[in-house]
Amino acid sequence: MARGRLNSGAKAEAELPKAKINKQSLQNVGKLLSYIKPYRAKFIAGLFFLFISSLVGLAFPAILGALIDAAQGTQKFKFIPLSLTAIGVGGFILLFAQAFVSFFRVVWFVQVAEKSLADIRRDTYFKLITLPMNFFANRRVGELNSRISSDLSQIQDTLTTTFAEIIRQVIIMVGGVILLAIVSVKLTLTVLAVLPFMVAFAVVFGRFIRKLSKQAQDKLAESNTIVEETLQGIANVKAFVNEAFEAGRYNNILQDVVKIAVRGAKFRGIFASFIVFCLFGAFVGVIWYGSVMVSHHEMNVGDLTSFIMYTIFVGAAMGSFPDLYANIQKAVGATERVLEILGEHGEDISIIDDNNTINERIQGNLSFSDVVFAYPSRSELTVLNGISFDAAAGQKVAIVGPSGSGKSTMAALILQFYHPQSGTILFDGRPADDFALTDIRNQVAIVPQDVLLFGGTIMENIAYGKLNASKEEIIQAAKRANADQFITSFPEAYETVVGERGVKLSGGQRQRIAIARALLKNPAILILDEATSSLDSESERLVQEALEELMKGRTSIIIAHRLSTIREADKIIVLEKGNIIENGTHQELVANEQGLYRYLSQLQYEVQ
């Protein structure tokens, strides 16, 4: 029945949300169950063996009763007189048969569940990585990861265990009640008049105890949050002499935990007393009433033994249904969340690598024509308002302006992460929609301010720009990016593992690996998004040299805060609040005494 712990030190389990089971939710489950179709032969065979195994299991109480009757010199099956040996051998044969079918049933169910779940995981992951950026802007990574892990694990448990267990328990309960009636109608009516109500009471009481347990765990989690916040901000706590305040906060939460845990313990005691007295009392009552019937020669001792065993089977089956139903609800909820992802409209990108090769070459001419854009999640806020500019192939175009003016948004639009509400982005004089999405992204590279490296080796991270690159090509790209010297200084050189998100490397080193990656890609259009803004002077010099090498012969869109890095740009575009308010060369813009560029330039030189 209920196994919820109310010990305040017990680890709280993450409860998956449950969904209501109705026609719509069952249709959703049906959609996901379509993944079983390729393996339906084994699934049907597993169901058949499950049915046989459950029926064989129901035979054992009868065999036990027959053995007891035979030992007393009476025959349970008068039409087939059997000796003790024959009954015992028959029991072992049935046991072997059950073991045989159970083995294949378990193996086949697991094979079907694992293979179909692998297909669901694959399709869910493939769908996720081909969804547009707007999808990820509105969701947390942890939430999406939970759908791949927790939700699909719940579905897996349901397919491998819960589904089979429900069928087994239904067969045991229905078959058990029928066999109870065959053994003794009087005793069966007595049991059915009492047992369901006691099981229902135990289930409801158990849920109440689990609810109290969850309250205790929630309070304990609050106390842990206080500890975490206090220790993370210990300098502030001490600076403001708030040790007593934090101690009081923590003590109040602990007192609440104790109150809930003690209250729960009282109900646990009541529940334990109920189990001992009522349920066991019911079995004692059945045995007592059955013994009276045996004494009146209304049934044999073996029949009474079989009846008691069947009563235990039926009671256990009834008691298991609430938990099984709760698991089904969780699986239905998990199914809905997974189907939500599978139903999303993804980008036109194939998951087959050979289908994503470049079909149309881009020379590097880039134009924005009256582009108006607002992020879908904040449609009321226009980020770019009528942006128009041209960048000829091979030109260096810098974009400057205050934070929030729309500079990085322009980079996202060039990469086709988002699409403007109006206006057109053109590549080589043709609208972006005329090109395959993969053609554009294969020929545009970005070096961001915050470089994300994957947790593999340096060589693997550089090769991410061109997966089929040779080792010589990777080393050559690293040399051109001023990265070879620091890479070879490591004991494992290019096989050095960079750690999660590249934490084992400095900012400048990560930037140069990102530049090497972009060099290997050899793009027609290059985007530098604040690529040197967070580096020290020496790292900036090395990265700037690498960037100069990277920008040779290709269109470069340079987003920069440090205006000293863009003096040589062919064109500088000044953005403010989503509008282009100035454009020209460095000399032209500095000459404008009322211009924003001149003001920003003076500010930086005064600070320096």
Image (cartoon, rainbow, N blue to C red):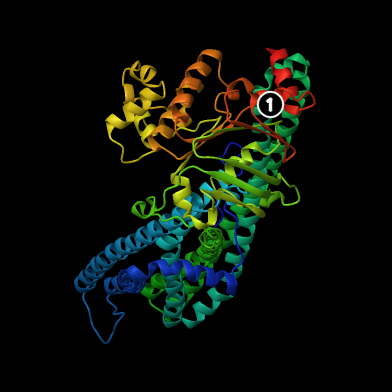
Give the labeled residue for mark 1.
588
- Which residue in the rendered view is the most extreme toward the right? 594
**Most foreground residue, 543 or 359:** 359
**Most foreground residue, 126 or 312:** 126
**Most foreground residue, 96 or 251:** 251
In the drawing, does residue 491 fall left or right of residue 128?
left
Label 1 sits on a secondary structure element that is helix
- Give the x, y percent position of residue 520: 38, 34
Q: Is residue 276 visible?
A: yes
- Give the x, y percent position of residue 382: 73, 47
- Give the x, y percent position of residue 230: 68, 24
The residue shown at (64%, 37%) is 407
In the drawing, does residue 282 fall left or right of residue 517?
right
In the drawing, does residue 348 fall left or right of residue 77?
right
Q: Is residue 308 visible?
A: no
**Most foreground residue, 96 or 533:** 533
The residue shown at (37%, 50%) is 357
Q: State which quarter of the image contains the N terminus.
A: bottom right
- Give the x, y percent position of residue 607: 71, 14
Circle 1: is it few (<14), some (14-19), or many (20+) Cα within 10 Å? some
Q: State which quarter of the image contains the C terminus.
A: top right
Count of picture labels: 1
What's the amino acid at mark 1? Glu
